[in-house]
């Protein structure tokens, strides 16, 4: 029981740290304009930043678009996914 509590506390603490990132992946379906708009909506970034991230995903196949705690990254990824863009949430730095 004590180990379970410790594990749960560690998991919650891990999710609340700002060590997570959202990655988007290029696709052949969603227009660049739509991706730019959804990035601005989901992450509150500027037009220039959204265009840069969209171009990076288009040319390199993927791009990190947001850095925050896990809960915030899940929120952002859910919004971006609504237009058909594949997302992934992972640790910002892998130990």
Image: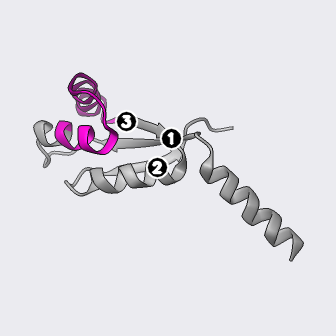
Quadrant where the C terminus is found in the figure = top right
Mark number for residue 68? 1
Residue located at (34% from left, 57% from top)? 78
Question: Residue visible at 40% across and 54% down?
Answer: 75
Say whether marks 1 and 3 touch (CB < 8 Å).
no
Label 3 – label 2 distance at C-alpha: 12 Å
Q: Residue at x 30, y 36 (%)?
A: 61
Residue closest to the eye, 29 or 64: 64
Q: How would you rate the neighbour count of disc 3 (Cα within 10 Å): few for under 14, some for 14-19, many for 20 or more?
A: many
The magenta stretch spans which residues? 36-62
**Which of the two residues, 43 or 19, is positioned nearer the viewer here?**
43
Does label 3 or label 2 sit earlier along the sequence?
3
Q: Residue furthest bottom?
A: 1
Residue 6 falls in image quadrant: bottom right
Quadrant of the image occupied by residue 24? top left
Element assignment for label 1: strand
**Between marks 3 and 2 in the image, the one whose residue lies nearer the viewer:** 2
Q: For the residues labelled 3 and 2, say whether their Cβ atoms are less than 8 Å apart.
A: no
| Residue 31 pos. (x, y %) | 11, 42
Q: Mark 3 = which residue?
A: 65
Q: Which element type, helix, strand or loop, lies under badge 2? A: helix
Please state the horizontal and vertical placement of residue 59, each as a whole percent of the image. 25, 28
How would you rate the neighbour count of disc 1 (Cα within 10 Å): few for under 14, some for 14-19, many for 20 or more? some
26 vs 64, nearest the viewer: 64
* Label 1–label 2 contact, CB within 8 A: yes
What is the CA distance from the residue labelled 1 to the residue labelled 2? 6 Å
Give the residue at mark 2: 72
Q: In the image, is 73 to the left or to the right of 63?
A: right
């Amino acid at each position: 029981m004590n180990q379970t509590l410790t594990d749960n506390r560690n998991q919650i603490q891990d999710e609340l740290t700002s060590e997570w990132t959202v990655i988007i992946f290029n696709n052949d379906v969603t227009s660049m304009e739509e991706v730019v708009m959804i990035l601005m909506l989901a992450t509150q970034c500027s037009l220039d930043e959204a265009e840069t991230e969209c171009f990076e995903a288009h040319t390199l196949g993927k791009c990190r678009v947001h850095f925050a705690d896990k809960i915030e990254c899940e929120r952002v990824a859910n919004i971006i996914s609504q237009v058909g863009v594949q997302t992934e949430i992972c640790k910002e730095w892998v130990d």
